[in-house]
């Protein structure tokens, strides 16, 4: 199985996440923009996620809440810049536990021989913000999400 | 008169713009969020700007068009993340002449002894995008805008 690549360079306020999926681009795109699919893979396995809103269009807002086994809640929200397309989905991202720190995420999907490379660039307001995100344990959630999305795409294609 | 500081560091996909204004923070904030004021200072002097929409609230969109003396048009648009406040105004920014390249701008206003330091951090998707913006002649527009806003704030306070 292909693995998630996470690039974190010293002094650069960005995180780049890349993973290849054995699925056509349109399906990977749907999995990122249809809330009924997003809820099935986004976030680490031990958290339960519920989506409050997810309006995947220019100016549309999204918000979701993740709950851990002890009942602690972690909420996130943002807004889409432009209408999402497989070429480019741009959205802002804010963890409500650290209000005022916002990132911008750009997802691009490239298909090659029926497989799809998903690349997400997260641009932060400062290197300190980026480092805080890395230290929060983000990597675990990103890797789990990648595995879960791989499984979901297999299930969707088996149907 | 205080001058605009523009910080462009090699390899860092950001531009930081700072300028101090001899005006209270609330007024500087209004000048950035009320379209009737924005249209009076934003952009280089030789261009004429018209604002098509400017909805300064969470998820609100903005779009403006600048026209040069030869009639060439340059359009820009974006969306606000969160409700703007003097502490933080976050918005995305895209020049329609270079579609698909998006930046996120964060404006913070700090008041000290009746003067206000305005700091804008623009975070780009890549260093190439940032360098493209610098090479486009952005600096001239930023400096003109700072001078024009200084003059507008003087006029507003003289009233």
Image (cartoon, coloured by chain):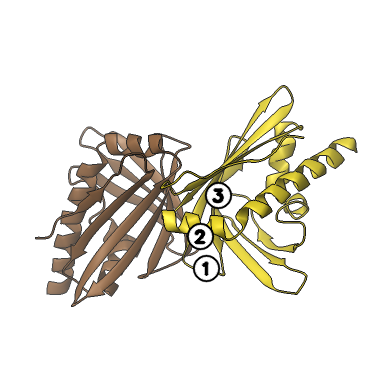
Chain colours: A brown, B yellow
Residue B132: assigned label? 2
Mark 3 lies on a secondary structure that is: loop
Q: Is residue A40 above or below residue A112?
A: above
Q: Residue furthest left?
A: A1
- For residue B58, the mark is 3
Q: CA distance from mark 1 to mark 3?
A: 25 Å
Provide the chain ID for the residue under circle 1.
Answer: B
**How dense is the environment of label 2, judged by Cα within 10 Å: few (below 14), some, or many (20 and up)?**
some
Task: Quote the CA–CA distance across marks 2 and 1.
Answer: 10 Å
Quadrant in which the C terminus of chain B appears: top right
Q: Quadrant of residue A129?
A: top left
Q: Which residue is mark 1?
A: B98
The quarter of the rendered structure image containing the N terminus of chain B is: top right
First along the sequence among labels 2 and 3: 3
Callout 2 secondary element: helix
Mark 2 on the same chain as mark 3: yes
- Residue A68 is marked as none
Question: Whole-percent x and y of residue A137?
Answer: 24, 37
Pair 2/3: label in front: 2
Q: Nearer the viewer, mark 2 or mark 1?
A: 2
Tell me whether circle 2 and circle 1 mark residues in contact (CB < 8 Å). yes
């Amino acid at each position: 199985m292909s693995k998630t690549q996470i690039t974190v360079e010293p002094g650069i306020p960005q995180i780049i996440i890349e993973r290849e999926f054995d699925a056509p681009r349109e399906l990977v795109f749907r999995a990122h923009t249809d809330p009924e699919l997003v809820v099935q893979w986004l976030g680490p396995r031990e958290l339960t996620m519920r989506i409050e809103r997810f309006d995947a269009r220019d100016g549309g807002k999204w918000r979701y809440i993740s709950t851990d086994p002890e009942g602690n809640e972690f909420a996130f929200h943002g807004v889409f810049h432009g209408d999402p397309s497989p070429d480019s989905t741009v959205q802002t991202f804010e963890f409500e536990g650290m209000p005022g720190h916002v990132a911008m995420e750009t997802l691009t999907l490239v298909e090659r021989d029926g497989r799809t490379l998903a690349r997400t660039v997260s641009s932060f307001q400062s290197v300190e913000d980026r480092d805080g995100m890395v230290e929060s344990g983000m990597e675990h959630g990103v890797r789990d999400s990648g595995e879960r999305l791989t499984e979901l795409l297999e299930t969707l294609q088996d149907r």
